[in-house]
Amino acid sequence: MKTGMSVDEIALAKSLGQAIAKRRAICGLTQEDLAERLDIGNEAVSRMERGTVPPSIARLHELAGIFRCSVCDLLIESSARSEEQSAYLAKLLENVSDEDRTVILDVVRRLSEHMQK
């Protein structure tokens, strides 16, 4: 892990790495494919996805272009802030039918009630 990082920064780097790995997989890219597009080594992509080396803002911009999403999408997906998680959930539900959305919301409500016990 990169020295000098706080516990919160380490958690954010890991979460951001997971979001990058998920987006890469959704796009059907391997780590090697992504490394080639970014003009970096495979190990650099691996470290970024594991969260050991967080990407720079410029690199986030490049990743967003490759994944055809916004930098905000990558950050929101990796955020631990409830407001941003709510925005992420809302985005996930955008293209879901009303009936399916009702089912999903019921599941989330039940999980939330269960977890609060």
Image: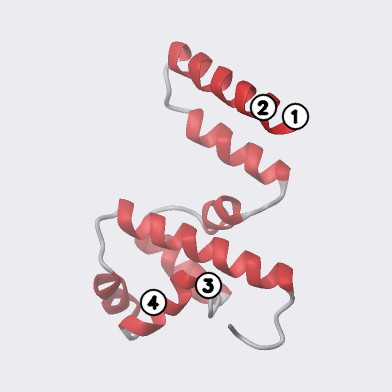
Look at the picture and state if 117 lies above or below 44. above
Q: Amino acid at mark 2?
A: His
The front one of 17 and 88 is 17
Place of residue 113 in the rendered image (x, y in percent of width and height, measured from the top left): 69, 24
* Labels 4 and 1: the sequence-earlier one: 4
Q: Quadrant of the N terminus?
A: bottom right
Q: Amino acid at mark 3?
A: Gly
Of tags 2 and 4, the one toward the viewer is: 2
User: Which image quadrant is residue 54 in?
Assistant: bottom right
Residue under label 2: 114
Label 4 Cα crowd, 10 Å radius (few <14 / some 14-19 / many 20+): many
Q: Amino acid at mark 4?
A: Val
Q: Please name the residue shown 70% across and 80% down the image.
A: 5
Q: Is the C-beta separation of discs 2 and 1 under 8 Å?
A: yes
Residue 37 marker: none
Cα separation between marks 2 and 4: 38 Å
Residue under label 1: 117
